[in-house]
Amino acid sequence: MARSFGLLAIGLLLVSCVDVSDVPNFERMSAEELAEYNNSRSLSQMIVCAQDERSFSRVRRRRCATVEQMYGSAQQAEQLGVLNQIPGYTQ
């Protein structure tokens, strides 16, 4: 019992030491910063942001994800006509 408690304590200590400061916060980036970030990415890995409209809240939330996560694939994004809205995208 004491051994499992010790392992749990060590595990929690290691998890709390993880540094996530190198992960960019896309929701807080400006359009220029997103364009700069997207310049070095493939189309499926480019970041797109959309305003999440909620009927029950007055607070607008900005949701950012890769093209692949948001639309499924670059081909679907092309069919939906959203590629011209991606900061930093040029054909």
Image (tube, rainbow, N blue to C red):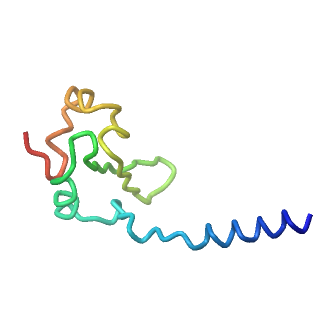
Q: In which quarter of the image is the C terminus?
A: top left
- The answer to whether residue 28 is above or below residue 84 is below
Coordinates of residue 47 in the picture (x, y in percent): 28, 50
Q: Residue at x 19, y 47 (%)?
A: 86
Tell whether 59 sits left or right of 80.
right
Q: Furthest residue to the left?
A: 91
Q: Furthest residue to the front?
A: 3
Who is closer to the viewer here, 78 or 8?
8
Coordinates of residue 2 in the picture (x, y in percent): 90, 68
Q: Residue at x 35, y 32 (%)?
A: 72
Q: Residue at x 44, y 58 (%)?
A: 58
Q: In which quarter of the image is the N terminus?
A: bottom right
Tell whether 63 sits left or right of 35.
right
The image quarter in which residue 83 lies:
top left
Who is closer to the viewer here, 84 or 33?
33
The image quarter in which residue 12 lies:
bottom right
Q: Which residue is drawn at 34% across and 51% down?
A: 51
